[in-house]
Image: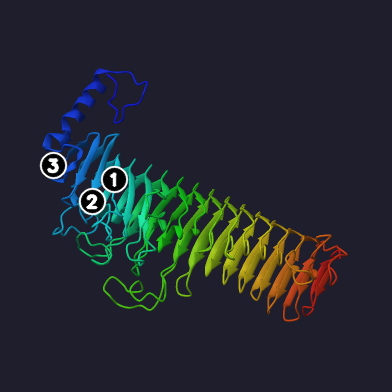
Amino acid sequence: MSTPVAQWLPGMTMTAGRLQYMLERLSESLTVTAYGAVGTGTVDDAPAIQAALNAAKIRGGWVIVPPGTYLLATLPLRIYRNTRLTLLPGARLVRGAAETMLINGDAAQNLGGYTGHGNVTIEGGVWDMQGTAPGLTASAMCISIGHAQNVTIRDLEIRDVSGYHAIELNSTKHGIVENCRFLGYVDPDGTRNFSEAVQLDLAKSAGVFGGFGPYDHSPVEDVLISGCYFGASGTAGTTAWPRGVGSHSATITRYHRRIRVNACTFEGLPQYAVSAYNWEDAAITGCTFANCGSGVRFRAVILSDTEDTKTPDGIQTGASQSMRNLAVTGCTFRGGGSYDEPIVALGEVSGKILNLAIAGNTIDTTSGGENGIRLQEVQRFTVSGNTISSVDGTAVSMETCHNGTVTGNHVYTPGTHGLTAVTCAHLSMVGNQVMYPGANGILIQDGNDLQVRDCYIKSPGTSANATHYGIRISTAASSVSLSGNKVRPNGSGNEAINALSITNTCTNIARYGNDFRGAEFTGGALADGSTSPQTLATDLA
């Protein structure tokens, strides 16, 4: 006899074992119409659906919602452990009360850590929050999960949420959100322009998670968000979500860990599509960002936030904390807005961002002066193999970043600089190509122990004649090595002053084997004013 399977797929041979498995699963099911739900959209079906969920609470079970429109005027619905809630194709839940639609557990429960109502699956259907309807415009949640393990939410469409979140995973371990659509958002009073469709948060306080306690600061761990779409619904009075996936609370000594956002699409979001606040061991892979205010932000605990800089016992540290092991790979960013960069990583002096990889991404166009990639207070990082074109600011901007490599990136027509390193140390920029930058091809200000090797810069300074440079090193930079680089002028129109310019405030400069030829540079190809430059092999000028 063949082994039973958990999922029927077309083409599977019907066997006695599989048929028996299907019959056993059907015998466990609790259809809401058997508890009095009618699905006409004219009467309150919430009590009947809750009765089915209560029946599943006793022994666990499968609650099935057949096709139909189910008005929910008695809320919230409460789901309990070992329950599978399935909305069949054509099923629609319509919120009819100013409350959360579904929460896992009871208001009075006191199940800490991840011991609450878990092992839950929620799948299918349209969940219409009606955030613009009279009496329903106040902030509310669609699905709220806390203190749980093993939660799967899939194949939903959540529409027109007002104020809060479509899904909150709070103090949750082992969660999956896959193949869901998050459409439409309402900011009820102009104060919720930062809400995420999927929020990952910790059990910090009733103000952070209002469903139930205890408030033991349990974070989120092991979450996958995959194959989801975030955008607008088209309903009058709504917008796209401000943010797609993210967090906006923190506690010192706690982290959200092992978060993966994979193959999702974010379209028209005015702020961050992914805001990884105080996350560790996180990866954003294969996602598409179209016309969003910003793409991916990694952010250490904000030093000026006096709530987030407290420990679980309420002691004020006055400090941030480092976060580590982060990656953005294989993503596409198109038409970025002016809220922030497509990729930005911001640490604090007391909370560095460590072990960051940004690789194989495509960034096409920003506005509002935004850069392509911006790093601040980042250590141990790589920026490699990215294609960055038509950004309004700098392609790759680094400030106070140490122990990094920027290699093999292709930069086309940035509005200002190609690559910038300000007060950076132990940094290598190798094998990058910068074409037609508006300002400098590569700009180094201050910092030490830097190398620029095998980079090609074409037509620097296209925005203004006799103003910029191919490679510019200034402001007390020291111990800088330049080798195998090639800079070429534009040949017509605006030209840079020099292919290489080093100010007299710089020390311990070593350069060899570079190619800076070009009679069109307005101040000559080479202007090395540093103290005692060391030239080990003849540069071409």
Q: Which residue is mark 1?
A: 127
Q: Which element type, helix, strand or loop, lies under badge 3? A: helix
Q: Which residue is mark 3?
A: 48
Estimate the x, y position of residue 501 in percent, counting from the top left: 77, 72
Instruction: Tell me, yes or no, whether the two marked residues, 1 and 2, touch with CB atoms within 8 Å.
Output: yes
| Residue 518 falls left or right of residue 263 | right
Q: Which residue is mark 2?
A: 101
Residue type for callout 3: Ala
Q: In this rendered view, identify the residue nearer to me: 170 or 5.
A: 170
| Residue at 27% across, 58% down | 140
Q: In this rendered view, identify the residue nearer to me: 166 or 352.
A: 166
| Residue at 34% across, 65% down | 254
Q: Earlier in the sequence, mark 3 or mark 2?
A: 3
Location of residue 184 with respect to 300 vertically, above or below: above
Residue type for callout 2: Met
Q: Quadrant of residue 530?
A: bottom right
Picture quarter with the N terminus: top left
Q: Residues within 10 Å of mark 2 (few under 14, many from 20)?
A: many
Q: Earlier in the sequence, mark 1 or mark 2?
A: 2
Location of residue 518 with respect to 449 vertically, above or below: above
| Residue at 33% across, 78% down | 316
Q: Quadrant of residue 368?
A: bottom right
